[in-house]
Amino acid sequence: MRTTRIAGAIVLTLALATACNDEPGVAKSPPQATDLQAYYAQRVTWKPCGDGFECGKAEVPLDYAKPGAEKIKLSLIRLPAGDKAHRIGSLLTNPGGPGGSGVEFIRNAGRTFGSDLRKRFDIVGFDPRGVGASAPVRCMDGPQLDRFFGADSSPDDQAEVDALAQVSKGFADACKARAAAELPRVGTRDAARDMDVLRGALGDKKLTYYGASYGTYLGTYYAEQFPGNIRAAVLDGAVDPTLSSTAILVEQAKGFETALRAFAADCVKTDCPLGKNVDGAIAKVSQLLAKADRTPLANRRDSRKINDSWAVMGIATAMYAKEYWPVLRQALSQALTRNDGTLLLAIADQMVERKPDGTYSNQTDANMAVNCVDKPNPPDTATYGKAADQAKRESPRFGAFVVWGGLPCVYWPVQTKEQPHAMAAKGSPPIVVIGTLRDPATPYKWARNLASQLDKGVLLSYDGDGHTAYLQGNACITKATDRYLIEGTPPKKGTLCH
């Protein structure tokens, strides 16, 4: 997904297309192996880093056109295979974003992968270039990001549009000032090339990969560049690479609206602060946001004003996993009965990785940096305004917030000419694409579209809620995915798990 004040790293931001001056619609051939031989020949030195995990680093060139020039180090982590005698290799993973730390993902979730999978593979995570501990892009400090996320991202008049434009330009200017050298080379094309170097550094002849959300776009881009180097790849919560930057945002907003309706339908079955019918519940959410737009909700945590921007982010964050829904019910109850938005704000902070001391991870900086160089961006606020109006019609609660969140890309110092295009990855083995029917951040139809675009795409569907499917604990999804990754046998086309 793209970065918006709503769609941050949990939400994979849609990084599409790539680098700075590439010919539109053409996937460039990777450089000859001799140019990169030393990178492929390296081996990761693993050291224990707590709780059974091992950590290491690998070098990649900052610019693949100049492999002998500046180098950067990528940070990695692995959970070693449980059955060394029957180990197949490494399962490289990416949790999305862009901007999500793959190291933290595996440290927190590595043991939730299927037990059979963990026996046969080292489960490996990495921080992509510009992210986490891998030459991180840094643009704004904590107070600056507080102001950025707290800006009114559903402007009602030209004065509010101008104010939002000023804040958005400030974000772009801060990145130019602090990370100008890195910005041209943080895109998905280069990150996908890094993955092939990592394949070599991990000692694997072919890549076995699991990517979630934005990680599906990264995996698709890898498959397009290196189809013959894939052993097996699972793309969970898929991104459609043919969509324009604003089309992505509009569709994503609609996905959040679908998820909110599913939440409301679940809520009204019990003691729900939103009432006893779905339409009435949705209306109460609208009323709450309109009220917060006029007068901020109370905040018992810090000095931030909890306006509708923060409130929408809190609601959207809870759409990512059904386990959040009880917490959201409590947060909405406090906001509606006591005008208290503290819990909504705490949920929102999870999305943007804001820490209790007011500092942030570099997720937001990296997320914006990748998105803004990956696809052509609209030239002005007027174009964004038209897309926001469309999104608001189709997604009244989320549309404006999601679309306007991409506005910093208008002012980005690095722009690409490469256009969105379908990626067939001809020459690859079967690639499994997983779609969740009511996914808020990567709508189900994106999975259908990607599976049909890939030359050997196989769609696996999950009739469920939340963002992505594999780590949600559904036995059908786990069995089908693990069998494919271990044996290479994809599920039957049309498989639907409940």
Image (cartoon, rainbow, N blue to C red):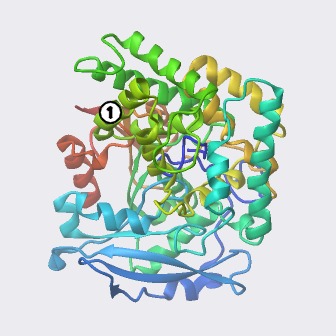
Task: Using the rendered view, name the quadrant where residue 2 is placed.
Answer: top right
**Between residues 226 and 39, which one lies in front from this camera angle?**
39
Looking at the image, can residue 454 be seen? yes
Q: Look at 43% across and 32% down and name the residue there.
A: 444
Residue occupying the point 64% across, 29% down: 400
Quadrant assignment for the N terminus: top right
Residue 325 found in image quarter:
top left
User: Residue 217 appears at what percent x and percent y?
Assistant: 53, 50
**Where in the figure is residue 135, as x and y percent of width and height?**
60, 75
Q: Is residue 125 above or below residue 496?
A: below
Residue 496 in the image, given as x and y percentages of width and height: 27, 32
The image shows residue 170, relative to residue 38, as above or below, that is above
- Disc 1 marks a residue whose amino acid type is Gln
Q: Nearer the viewer, residue 207 or 463?
A: 463
Q: On the picture, is 377 further left or further right than 289?
A: right
Residue 426 in view:
no
Looking at the image, residue 418 sits to the left or right of residue 306; the answer is right
Callout 1: SS = helix
Q: Residue at x 69, y 27 (%)?
A: 388
227 relative to 345, above or below: below
Q: Decide: few, some or many residues near mark 1? Use Cα within 10 Å; few <14, some 14-19, many ≥20.
A: some
Which residue bears the numbered disc 1?
Answer: 330
Q: Which of the pair 489/448 is nearer the observer? A: 448
